[in-house]
Amino acid sequence: MKKRLIVLSFFIFHISFITSLASWADIGPQLERFGQTDRQEELVSEANAFFRQLYEEEFLDTLYIYNSNTPAGILREQVWYWAAEYLYEQQQYEQAETYGMKALPLIRQADNSELEADCLSLLAIIHVRLSNYEKAVGFAKECYKLDEASGDPDRMSSSLNTLAGIYMAANQPEQAEQYVLKGVELAGKAGNPGRQAVLLGMASEVYHAMGDDEQALAYIQQAYELEQQLGREYKAMVRLSQKASVLVGLHRYQEAEQVLAQVIPYFREVGDRQSLGISCNKMGMTLLCQEQQGEAVTYYKEAAAIFLSIGDKSNEMHARKGLYESLWAIQPDSAKMELDRFNELKDSLYNTVSAESLARYNAEFGNDWLQQENEAERAARRRVIMVAIIAVCGLLLLSVLIWWLMRCRQHRQAAINLQLSANIAELREKYKELSVRYDNAMATGATDEQRENLAAADRDFLEKTVDIINEHLLNGQADAESVAEQMNMSLFQFRQRLSSLTNETPQSFVALIRMRRARYLLDNRPELNISEVAQLCAYNDTSNFSRAFKKTFGITPTQYVEKQKEV
């Protein structure tokens, strides 16, 4: 049986090595003939011809030969399953899904649990490629249950890698973390270095997405070294491509560019369009970070064309967003077209139903592998829970009392917030500054139309950013990551855009808005004390608020109030 490692090795961001596989035009008619006949002799003949083709293409390392005594159900099960594997490798995802769904019920009838798990895993991966995360996680759930029942740590680690990959594709790295770490542990128990390299690569992707690039670099370096020790050149190149993302996150742009300059020609040479497109996306981002917009556009365009041709909406969305970021300062009209396409893709990929389904499945899976302890351990845990309940009951009365006191304060806070929200527009207009980019455009002799387009785009971006920050402050929050998410941008892309306009980082810009908000309140709301102003600016500690205010304006809030009284 072909190992699932072949399918899973480069699950979310990479696919397996493609040499010179036959096209869909070659294999399609053959599969159609096989599906239309019920004659045993023709079934055997077509099945053997199909497997001979896969063997000659070096897709299989063993030539499968069937005789006239092989049951028709077994023939169809094997042909449909391997057709799905083969078509997935060719990036023909819709056709692969069709044949995988044909194979699954036949495999279940034959009661072949190992092949059933392989087929479920394959279908999960195919549906990720088709951006249907709800179906993907459903198949992965069934696969993991079968692998768990087998007690094989290698198979279990493979399923957990699939789960982590699905949540990464759905942009939920925090959920992926638990699965990939458990998978790394099980791969170590299984003594499978190849599987360990795959999971370490996935762990790097997870921590990179979570912003912990130092940890991500450590994981990807381990994965790369394992691939080199195993002599797997292609997979080592995949790890280098992953490493480039981490280097960008660490602002080591020149190193990232050098790595990508090595892997992109390699993927072109071997004909792996998926990995090539992903690496082009990364090169575009690397160049954009170095303010080489023109060069970035070239790579982003190549990536967008690749993903459009193979129907990979998720990665095409990243390419379109990169094109928008690269073009908006030099070709505003083209940038708007790319932004429209990005929004279209985003709306089709991330909907409420999918999000709710993933959350439900995550809860179920969280219990699956966390409940492997024996009954004695469960009983001990129940005793601990009972003690905790008694302790909680003892604190309940105290909590109610504290809640009642806090509620009185919150009512007053809510009234102040409602009054303050009406003044956001006034605050924005009163303290808004011209952007650095607009000043530069005026100084370099841009046309009136270009200036107007650029100024309007900059104003819209800054006004929306200020509005969102103020909304967050009304809720007692001041989180740059949440602001970036509400702007439909990653924190990195938000940082680049905001810095180009204001020369400020997101964190410093949020801090600036908080201080302007504080000054406005001190100017216009004399009934508020310093502690209340601090809370309305999302400071829980008055001393921290005072230090931040003094750092910004040179005097403490109290000194500022006294000074205003003298004016």
Image (cartoon, helix red, strand yellow):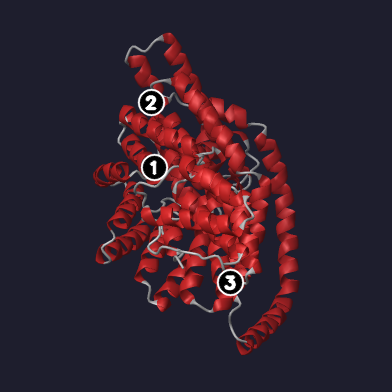
- Of the pair 104 and 489, the residue shown nearer to us: 104
- Residue at the location (55% across, 77% down)? 150
Q: CA distance from mark 2 to mark 1?
A: 39 Å
Circle 2 residue: 436
Q: CA distance from mark 3 to mark 1?
A: 33 Å
Q: Quadrant of residue 430?
A: top right
Horizontally, is 385 left or right of 253 in the view? right
- Of the pair 43 and 59, the residue shown nearer to us: 43
Q: Nearer the viewer, mark 2 or mark 3?
A: 3
- Of the pair 27 and 562, the residue shown nearer to us: 27
Name the N-terminal-most of marks 3 and 1. Answer: 3
The picture places residue 367, in percent across and down from the top left corner, at 62, 71
- Asked if residue 213 can be seen in this view, the reply is yes
For the residue marked with disc 3, what is the amino acid? Ser
Task: Return the residue found at the far top.
Answer: 448
- Residue at the location (49% across, 55% down)? 85
Q: Nearer the viewer, mark 3 or mark 1?
A: 3
Horizontally, is 219 left or right of 378 in the view? left
- Circle 3 packing at 10 Å, graded few (<14), some (14-19), many (20+), is some
Circle 3 residue: 113
Circle 1 residue: 273
The picture places residue 111, in percent across and down from the top left corner, at 62, 72
- Residue at the location (58% across, 79% down)? 372
- Residue at the location (60% across, 59% down)? 40
- Circle 2 packing at 10 Å, graded few (<14), some (14-19), many (20+), is some
Mark identifier at residue 418: none
